[in-house]
Image (cartoon, rainbow, N blue to C red):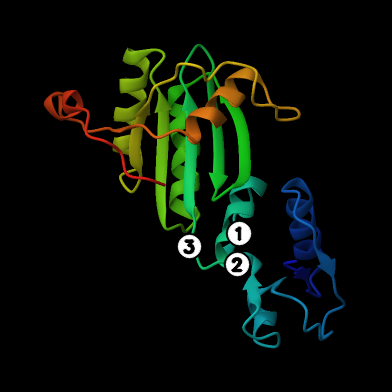
Amino acid sequence: MVRICVMTSQARVYYSLVSRLRKADLPFISLVSGTRHPECDLTLTTRAESDTIGHSALPAELLDDDPFVFKGQILSHLDDGRETLLIGVDPGRRIGMAVYYGETSLEFNSFDSMEILCSRVASFVRKVPAKKSLVRIGNGNSALAMGLALSVTRRVPGAMIEIVDEAGTSVRGLRIKGVQGDQRAAARIAIRKGVAFNQSPRSRASGAPAPEV
């Protein structure tokens, strides 16, 4: 089992880290500053204190304030960014989103605005190191799906984008506690192979198969 430790003499930093770890549902051990704990795989601390800890140290200054982006950064650091950052999007009156790092969920959310959705996607892609970043968008509303794909392409040039057949994504087979219907649909979209999106209409019509995750 991976052990995340928090060790800093800075009270404000300590409570900030602990708050984000709890919101991200990441178990951790609190250590008194200066304590040696060989079982720590990752020790969250400050940049000034990191030299006394060694290779397991991760300075709080490098981590995002948002607990869900923070969770992705922690998981990525633990495996050197070897997994895929996977984002499923369910277009509609409210836009559902599901974000995973590998097989671990980071966030489920819903948005009333395409602009806010794109900003959220950009935050994950830019701040969570990963083997690749893949955004999958359901095609239930083709015009909205294409608009979202174009917006994500422009705002997040580092992401690969796929358009996914949305048939069946709204069924109730996927149960996630506390997650709304559009977010569950986004989660189902996230795990389905789609067709690679290309800004050129001719390229989109060709239906080239998407790469495996």
Q: What residue is disc 1 on?
A: 75
**Amino acid under disc 2:** Leu
Which residue, given by chain and number where applicable, does mark 3 sit on?
82
* Residue 1 picture location, percent across and down: 75, 66
35 displayed left or right of 110: right
| Numbered circle sitting on residue 212 | none
- Amino acid bearing label 3: Arg
Q: Is 116 above or below relative to 75?
A: above
Q: Secondary structure at mark 3?
A: loop
SS category of the residue bearing label 2: helix
Tell me which amino acid carries mark 1.
Leu
Image position, residue 116 (x, y; %) = 49, 29
* Residue appearing at x 50%, y 46% in the figure: 124
Q: Is residue 81 left or right of residue 184?
A: left
Q: Which residue is mark 2?
A: 78
Q: Position of residue 165 (x, y in %)?
A: 39, 22
Front position in the image: 206 or 74: 206
- Is disc 2 in contact with disc 1, using a CB cutoff of under 8 Å? yes
What's the residue at 65%, 66% (across, down)?
60
Q: What residue lies at 56% left-to-right and 31% top-to-bottom?
A: 187
The spot of residue 145 in percent (x, y) is 36, 20
- Residue 202 image-quadrant placement: top left
Q: Residues within 10 Å of mark 3 (few under 14, many from 20)?
A: some
- Point out the tag, 1 or 3, that comes first from the N-terminus: 1
Secondary structure, mark 1, is helix
